[in-house]
Image (cartoon, rainbow, N blue to C red):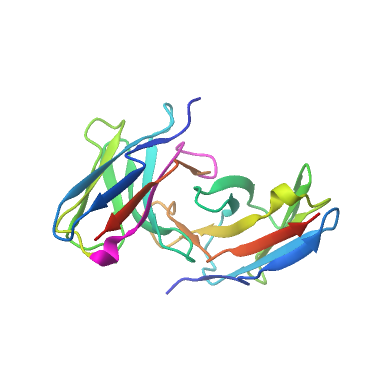
Amino acid sequence: DTGVSQDPRHKITKRGQNVTFRCDPISEHNRLYWYRQTLGQGPEFLTYFQNEAQLEKSRLLSDRFSAERPKGSFSTLEIQRTEQGDSAMYLCASSLTGGYNEQFFGPGTRLTVL
Amino acid sequence: QKEVEQNSGPLSVPEGAIASLNCTYSDRGSQSFFWYRQYSGKSPELIMFIYSNGDKEDGRFTAQLNKASQYVSLLIRDSQPSDSATYLCAVNNSGDQAGTALIFGKGTTLSVSS
């Protein structure tokens, strides 16, 4: 069990640029989640996949954000036309279907928008 | 707006003492309750989960749940300096399609002095 991995770990970009993050879940986990965390706050849910299907998306999520999980394995999160307010830690988590949905987080991607 | 409330702290305890962390939640339909530990600059780490009213013990950690009062707590016995971290309470969002997204509190910062 290698755990959830995320790439890159850090990203610095200029306002208006597009960025893409990758998440590889724990191998047998078919549920994958994206959260965002800013300083002093708890993680905030963004979106959720079961296998390749995106089943839930936060109403707070801007249209500039899009996520995919094309083959039900890794997932990507893209932010278009980044804004300074997008600066945050982007966290990916995975879990098994069934049970009580214990979610395990990856190390996160820290985004800084200048 | 569903909320999870935690005292931000800091909660300061001497080494060897019991640390008591508390959390209240607003979603009466929540069924799964989690405690995560987060060290500064790191991602959240799952340390306890509980689904039934009462107590659940795991080593030095005890989680307590009272659904009628919408209250969850975490006790850490024999606190160690390595327990110094932010503790995040999370509950599942019963309102989303699969009830799997987690709603997090802002966390309580624990400081254990040697």
Of A69 and A112, nearer the camera is A112
Q: Which residues are magenta?
A: A84-101
Residue B104 pos. (x, y %): 50, 61
Residue displayed at 60% across by 58% down: B86
Residue displayed at 54% across by 40% down: A99
- The quarter of the rendered structure image containing the C terminus of chain A is bottom left
Q: Is residue A92 magenta?
A: yes
Of A43 and A28, nearer the camera is A43
Residue displayed at 74% across by 65% down: B12
Residue B68 pos. (x, y %): 67, 70
The image shows residue A97, relative to residue B63, as above or below, that is: above
Of A39 and B70, nearer the camera is A39
Residue A35 pos. (x, y %): 38, 53
> Among all residues in the image, which is located at the extreme bottom?
B1
Counting every numbered tag in the picture gives 0
Left or right side of B8 for A12 = left
Quadrant location of residue A15? bottom left
Left or right side of A6 for B18 = right
Residue B32 pos. (x, y %): 56, 53
The image shows residue B90, relative to residue B5, as above or below, that is: above
Residue displayed at 43% across by 27% down: A28
Q: Is residue A88 magenta?
A: yes
Quadrant location of residue B110? bottom right
Left or right side of A13 for A87 = right
Left or right side of B44 for B68 = right
Quadrant location of residue A71? top left
